[in-house]
Image (cartoon, coloured by chain):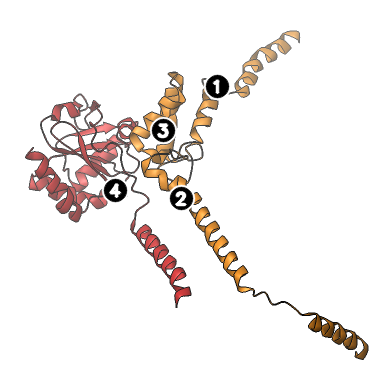
Chain colours: A red, B orange
Amino acid sequence: MNRFLLPLSIFVVVVVFLGVGLTLNPREIPSPLVGKAAPEFSQPQLYDQEKIFSPADLKGKVWLLNFWASWCSGCKTEHPVLMDLAKSGQVPIYGMDYKDEREEALNWLRRWGNPYPVIGVDQAGRVGINYGVYGVPETYVIDKHGVIRYKQIGPLDPGTVETKILPLVKQLESQ
Amino acid sequence: MIWLTLLIVLVSGPAWAGEARPLGEDPAVEARLKHLAIELRCLVCQNQTLADSNAPLAEDLRREVRDMIVKNMSDKEIIDFLVERYGDFVLYRPPLKATTTLLWVGPFVLLLVGATVLVITLRRRARKVVDAPVTDEEHRRVEQLLAQGGKHS
């Protein structure tokens, strides 16, 4: 009995480690930007190209910044969730059209609806790099002082909105 | 005739120059970019370096790195710029710090554990072999049997 105890316990430990490893998503890279000031930018707006969209305009507000593109299939999956969240009026979602064609982006919004009060255009992907974006859609929760508090990599789903985004927004609002 | 030859030489001259190397790309910048890009991980296709990958993000990041090289930033400044945004994940060689200690020390710990187990097992095995001395009488008998066996067969 005793001679099987050691190999068995090693086996159990290995299985536990591998089991935990299977539940992790290697695509989710922890962002070093959480807890840091959201990088500044001033980008032309999608609808009114003369106007500028900058996070400085949103100081004192809790808001979401959502990187999306018309070519991104995850953005389509996420879109109804954003529409519902926008309709609920609990937190404004600002958009950043990432490496996209203007006409296609406009068509996409016409077809599926527009959850964003303002959309910035990041044609060259430079704002994306400053925010550490590596796969759209990505969503950032930014607090009243302009600090990034949460980063969602990949599409938002109703569960994440209910359990993570909204409680965090409420907590940040009360600060 | 001589004019025609001269004309051909004049017209074709720039064509050769064009083939030699693409203009606007400083070879020193490209060499530094290559040297940096093989140390950096592409975030989209995670097992490729920034130098290997054709993902749009990798192209953008190479462009940013090239711009920073042209601005004469040091390798450390460029790498810090990327780590600030993407974390240590962009580095193919993770730095030694609190969160990566297990990664760096782990193999040596395993080696030590393995060596200890090996030494213990060998010592135990050595103890199992009982020392059974052969008496002179037995020795003589063995010799005798061996000699006989050789004769019979």
With respect to residue B99, does B137 lie above or below? Answer: below
Q: CA distance from mark 2 to mark 4?
A: 32 Å
- Could you tell me which secondary element the residue under label 1 belongs to? helix
Q: Which residue is mark 1?
A: B28
Q: Dot 2: within a 10 Å radius of its alpha carbon, few (fewer than 14), some, or many (20 or more) residues?
A: few
Q: Is residue A67 visible in the rendered structure shown here?
A: yes
From the image, state whether disc 1 or disc 2 is nearer to you: 2
* Residue B13 x %, y %: 65, 15
**Residues indicated by labels 1 and 2 sit on the same polypeptide chain:** yes
Q: Nearer the viewer, mark 3 or mark 2?
A: 2
Residue B106 disc label: 2
Residue A108, placed above or below residue A50: below
Say left or right for A135 vs A50: right
Residue B61 has which mark? 3
| Residue found at x 34% / y 45% | A29
Residue at mark 3 to residue at mark 2: CA–CA distance? 32 Å
* Mark 3, other Cα within 10 Å: few <14 / some 14–19 / many ≥20: many
Q: Residue at x 26, y 50 (%)?
A: A155
Measured as percent of width and height from the top left, residue B73 is found at 43, 21
Q: Please, what secondary structure does the residue beneath circle 3 have?
A: helix
* Left or right of residue A135: residue B12: right
Quarter residue A121 falls in? top left
Q: CA gap, disc 3 to disc 4?
A: 20 Å
Mark 3 / mark 1, whichever is N-terminal: 1
To which residue does mark 4 refer? A154
Q: Chain of mark 4?
A: A
Where is residue B109? Give x, y as percent. 48, 52
In the rendered structure, are the residues bearing label 4 and label 1 in contact, judged by CB atoms less than 8 Å apart? no
Q: Residues within 10 Å of mark 1 (few under 14, many from 20)?
A: few
> Callout 2: helix, strand or loop?
helix
